Image (tube, rainbow, N blue to C red):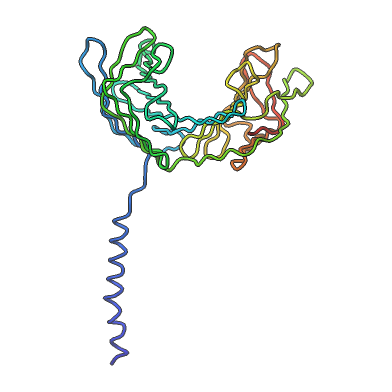
Amino acid sequence: MLKILSPLIFIPILLTACGDDHSDSAKETPPRVNAIASLIQITEENSQPKSLKVETTSTDDTQPIYSYTQLIDLNNDNVSQNYQLTYNFKTDHDYSLIVYFDALKNKPSKMQLWIETKIPELSDVFSCGDEQEPSCDNISLEIDHKTGNSKVIFNQAKIYNYDKNTLILSGSILGQLQKNPTIVKIPTSGLYNATYRISDQNQDIPMTHPNFKFFSFTNHNIQGFATSKSIHENLLYIITINDNVKEVWYTPSMSIYPLSIWNSESKTNLQKISYNPINLTVDFNQFKLSNDGYPDLYLNGMVGP
């Protein structure tokens, strides 16, 4: 009799266990998304306030609507780190709010509000923290550097365009990342040999600056590396997304082609370049760059920190 009842005894236990599993899964935290929530109001001179209230989300990590960027500067062997927050959203126009700050302050060092209209001539940019308005007042920041989430609070903050017209901002805007941002570790500086060749010249010319000095780490998957901030100084600029090289820009140190910039053709030639996300090096093998009206340029060798 006991042998017959044994299976019946276990049936309620199994049903209870299944029910518990279902209950636990229902309580799981939903996956994070890239998100913006704006409660900003803007007021132009002698005008009524206009609401920029909007909530928007995205799961496309290659073109995030909200970005948390860590900016590393190794120039002159002095390491400095700053941050950039970017909020892209749309109401009546396309808006891009960019906030720059350092880790020691809870207010922006610089801020820009780009307004793109359907009529390009009416597009505009308002800013503070520049020559026109050196200080960004009445703006405070709340940042979680672990998650990259942020909140910018405006209390009748004034920003200005090139013609000295004023916008007054009030309210707030929040940004949320899809994943925690990159934990930045810059490898020790190395020695690299890289050359370039112009297609109509039969010689390989050494790069004068094959080491990256400027780094940007955006969210969890987008990186930018530059050897200089000036096109006068043999600038090489590389963007990677999800550990794949997406863009390469190069200005050779040549008086024959002053201030000319070559760049990579989209989605072509990729087998000629490789990126190592551990040591942040990029290896070129006859990697072709183009520039309208100029001969092609080819990169060879390795560059890195």
Q: Quadrant of residue 44?
A: top left
- Height in image: 95 above or below 55? above
Front residue (pair 56, 114) = 114
* Residue 289 spot, x, y in % from top left: 64, 24
- On-image quarter of the C terminus: top right
Q: Which residue is drawn at 68% across and 35% down?
A: 190
Q: Please, is residue 234 above or below residue 4 in the view? A: above
Q: Is residue 289 left or right of residue 94?
A: right
Residue 197 in sight from this viewpoint: yes
* Residue 32 falls in image quadrant: top left
Of 97 and 103, nearer the camera is 103
Q: Which residue is found at the position 43% from the left and 26% from the top?
A: 100
Instruction: Look at the image and tell me whether residue 264 can be seen.
Output: no
In the foreground, 195 or 304? 304
Q: Residue furthest left?
A: 48
Quadrant containing the N terminus in the rendered view? bottom left
* Residue 183 pos. (x, y %): 50, 42
| Apparent side of residue 172 relative to residue 108 in the rendered image (left or right) | left
Q: Place residue 264 in its image quadrant.
A: top right
Q: Residue at x 31, y 60 (%)?
A: 24
Q: Work out which residue is located at the far top of the displayed protein and give it.
A: 163
Residue 120 position in % (x across, y down): 39, 13
Residue 233 appears at what percent x and percent y? 64, 18
* Furthest residue in direction bottom, as rendered: 1
